[in-house]
Amino acid sequence: MPNFFFAHIDDLSASWGATFSYLALLSAAYVWVMRNNISHYGRERRRLRQRYEPRPLPPETGRALAALRRHILRQNYLAAAALVPLGVFLLFSEITGFDEKGIRQLLRVE
């Protein structure tokens, strides 16, 4: 997040408010990318099946389509995985009742 967002913010909870609004925009982008990936695969599959109908797909075309599917699945897994640490961090943030140490206080018992 660019530092100029925090230039006028003094306390930590207010800075998290600015961060959450920025992250909300990013989460919408992640969801859009994942949906777009899935629809892209569907469009390509339909286009290729229509092109080769009634014959089966040639082997190289089938392999390319399978590779596209694997690529899209990997992208979507990475996009979803990128949101997991954020969710864990937000779950144990100061806003939910922990002090400014946040999640660190759960990982160290004194």
Image (cartoon, grey):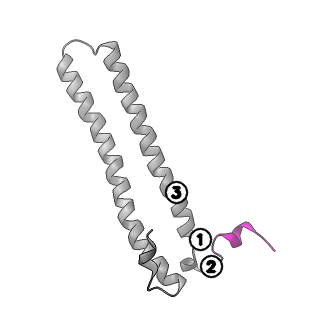
Give whichever of discs 3 and 1 has the lower sequence position. Answer: 3
Q: Are marks 3 and 1 in contact (CB under 8 Å)?
A: no
On the image, numbered disc 2 is attached to which residue?
Answer: 98
Where 55 falls versus 98 (above or below)? Answer: above
Q: Residue at x 51, y 82 (%)?
A: 13
Observer-nearest of 10 and 20: 10
Magenta stretch? 102-110
Q: CA distance from mark 3 to mark 2?
A: 19 Å
Residue type at numbered disc 3? Val
Q: Callout 1, which amino acid?
A: Phe
Extreme-right residue of the structure: 110
Quadrant in which the N terminus appears: bottom left
Q: Is residue 105 magenta?
A: yes
Q: Secondary structure at mark 2?
A: loop
Using residue 40 as the reference point, say whether residue 20 is left or right of it: right
Reading the image, the residue beneath label 3 is 84
Q: Quadrant for residue 44, please give it.
A: top left
Determine the image quadrant of residue 64: top left
Q: Are the two marked residues, 3 and 2, in contact with CB atoms closer than 8 angstroms?
A: no
Disc 2 from disc 1: Cα separation: 7 Å
**Horizontal and vertical percent for residue 27?**
39, 60
Give the secondary structure at mark 1.
Answer: loop
Residue 92 is tagged as 1
In this rendering, position of residue 39 left or right of residue 88:
left
Q: Residues within 10 Å of mark 2 (few under 14, many from 20)?
A: some
Identity, as a three-letter code, of the amino acid under mark 2: Phe
Residue at the spot 43% in from the left edge and 72% down from the top edge: 20
Residue 51 spot, x, y in % from top left: 18, 20
Is residue 94 found left or right of 41 in the rendered image?
right
The residue depicted at 33 percent of the width and 42 percent of the height is 37
Up the image or down, 26 lies above or below 74; here it is: below
In which quadrant will I find the C terminus? bottom right
